[in-house]
Amino acid sequence: MIRLYKEENLPELDRLLKDPNFMNDNQEEWLLTKRNINWAEKIPEQMTRESTFFAVGAGHLSGKNGVIQLLKDKGYTLRPVLGN
């Protein structure tokens, strides 16, 4: 998982996290999708108030309902902040 994250291989990371051996559809809905939609609504509000650094777990990044895509759908441009 760490390797995939560092490689920015979000599709493979998404596949691994949503493997049916680890997460079923109901868990995905409640642990990822609903939370991501909620965050994608709140993040723009926070950004208008002050400069903010947002960090989320790797499972919340990828997929059509990931925070990245949900914010892109709202017209935002996102870029990763990577360490060494």
Image (cartoon, rainbow, N blue to C red):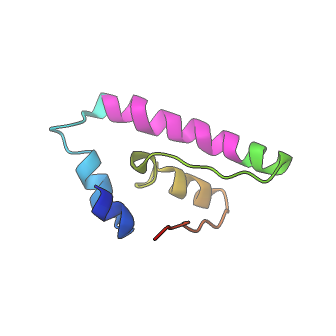
Task: Depth check: give the residue in front, 67 or 64.
Answer: 67
Examine the structure image and report whether residue 5 is included in the region drawn in magenta: no
List the single residue furthest toward the right: 49
Which residue lies at the image location 32% right of the left edge and 30% below the top edge? 27
Which residue lies at the image location 35% right of the left edge and 70% below the top edge? 7
Asked whether, in this view, residue 28 is left or right of residue 76, the answer is left
Which residue lies at the image location 60% right of the left edge and 40% below the top edge? 39
Which stretch appears magenta?
Answer: 27-43
**Is 69 placed above or below 42 here?**
below
* Picture coordinates of residue 64, whole percent (x, y): 44, 54
Q: Quadrant of residue 18?
A: top left
By secondary structure, the bulk of the magenta-drawn segment is best described as: helix
Examine the structure image and report whether residue 30 is included in the region drawn in magenta: yes
The count of marks equals 0
**Is 58 placed above or below 37 here?**
below
- Quadrant position of the N terminus in the picture: bottom left
* Picture coordinates of residue 32, whole percent (x, y): 42, 38
* Picture coordinates of residue 56, whole percent (x, y): 51, 46
Which residue lies at the image location 32% right of the left edge and 28% below the top edge? 26
Asked whether, in this view, residue 82 is left or right of residue 74, the answer is left
Task: Depth check: give the residue in front, 2 or 31.
Answer: 2
Asked whether, in this view, residue 65 is left or right of residue 28, the answer is right
Asked whether, in this view, residue 71 is left or right of residue 24, the answer is right
- Quadrant position of the C terminus in the picture: bottom left
**Is 7 placed above or below 62 here?**
below
* Picture coordinates of residue 4, whole percent (x, y): 30, 63
List the single residue furthest toward the front: 84
